[in-house]
Image (cartoon, helix red, strand yellow):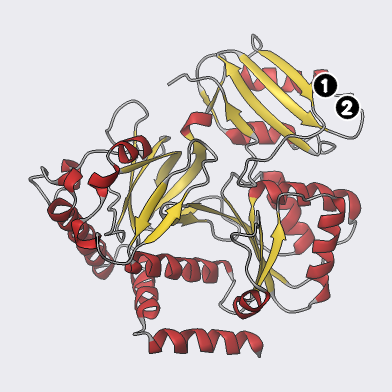
Amino acid sequence: MVLNFRNTIFWILDALKGGKIHKHYKELGVILEDYNSDNSKNLRKKHLNHLLNHAAKTVPFYKDIADKNNLEAFPVVNKLIIKDNYDAFKSSSYLNKKKYKVSTSGSSGTPFNLYQNKNKQNRNSTDAIYFAKRAGIAIGIKVYFIRVWTKYNRKSALLSWIQNVGMQNAANLNKAEIENFIAKLLKSKKSKGIWSYASALDTISKYVQVEHKEPINCNMTCVVACSERLNLHTKTTLQTYFNAPVISRYSNAENGILAQQKANTDHFDINWASYYFEIFKFDEDTPAELGELGRVIITDLFNYCMPIIRYDTGDVASIELDEHNVPVFKKVEGRRQDLIYNTKGELISSFVIGAVMKKYSNFKQFQFIQIDEKAYVIKLNTDTLFKGEQQLINEFKEALGNNCSIEIKYLNEIPLLASGKQRQVMSAYNKL
């Protein structure tokens, strides 16, 4: 009853404001649910052409672009280029209009700020509603957000009730905190969902395997992992314990929701409605082949305040066609700067690291780091004596090369980043 009430009130309020979210929502359905239709193609082409023309006419950085309707005439940019030419990326049409600041946490570098116009904010809100609904979390269902909550972003009791949001801090997920969180989930039999950093779900997964022998029957609708790569073992474990799908979402702070898995699938459905995507080779600005890993380049179709065109996200992924001939992300490998290579210089998926580590469930935390061409460090946080050290080293030598050097370090804690995330696989070796 309360769920329907919240849902109804939301759409009534949107209608009173001109129905902007509803219009975006309908368009998302047209574009994404029939990708190869003429309507979908025409809408995507219209949004791209409008953005390019707007940028070429009002953004100083793009003032010399002659072929305004040709995306290939626009240069590839990245965070450093935008920072070095910050004011030149601002549209003259929005200098004196209300704008909205978005910031990255700086988890993989220095913090990065952008400004968005109101329509871009509306599109992001609609993307959140649409992709949550795809995951089975409709407006009104309670969602527990596991993230770092501070005095600057914590919601008031009234606002959290209105939005039906539960706040669980990811900064200190110890045994007592996790037990209290599970007690909250069990207290209500109403439908609920979880949105969480993937590393926080790893911690919860390890806990329930030890402390909970039976499934946690709390009417969980879906668990959405974001911001980091979701460990396959964590995914299958939590699906069993919560009896609900656990899916990954690919997004970033500066743009929004880029792609999301469906239940029981490994690929990511791409948000072609709000972005145009290209996958480029690692060493040149030319398209990668279908199925080939490359750099994720996005054009944000709705940020007119600071148009982001052909933006190198720093992420790595590959695209393939699904059974309906729709381009999807076959793999999303995370940050380019954290790619792992074997001793032959061949790229190794971080899933290989996860596949080895999942066999050793007695670790509270782990972190795998490549420090040189053939040298790696494994950091382990464990309460118990680990007797399988040599076996672990031998397994990684099989995966990486028998001529590699592997050092194991034991720590009382592997600190989280300031954002509350944890990088389980990272590189201090710059091969590129």
Q: Residue at x 22, y 39 (%)?
A: 75
Amino acid at circle 1: Glu
Residue that numbered label 2 is attached to: 386
- Tell me the quarter of the image containing the N terminus: bottom right
- Tell me the quarter of the image containing the C terminus: top left
Residue that numbered label 1 is attached to: 389
Do we see residue 389 in this rendering? yes
Say left or right for 314 vs 289: right
Closer to the camera in the image, 181 or 26: 181
Instruction: Check the image and name the residue furthest to the top.
Output: 403
Say left or right for 249 vs 23: right
List x then y, in percent, for residue 261.
53, 56
Closer to the camera in the image, 195 or 86: 86
Q: Residue at x 80, y 46 (%)?
A: 206
List x then y, in percent, for residue 207.
83, 50
Question: For mark 1, does the 10 Å Cα neighbourhood hold few (<14), some (14 to 19), or many (20 or more) residues?
Answer: few
Dots 1, 2 in contact, CB < 8 A = yes
Give the image quarter of residue 365.
top right
In this view, 398 is above or below 423: above
List x then y, in percent, for residue 280.
33, 36
In this view, 342 is above or below 9: above
Say left or right for 309 vs 347: left
Give the image quarter of residue 79.
top left
Question: For mark 2, does the 10 Å Cα neighbourhood hold few (<14), some (14 to 19), or many (20 or more) residues?
Answer: few
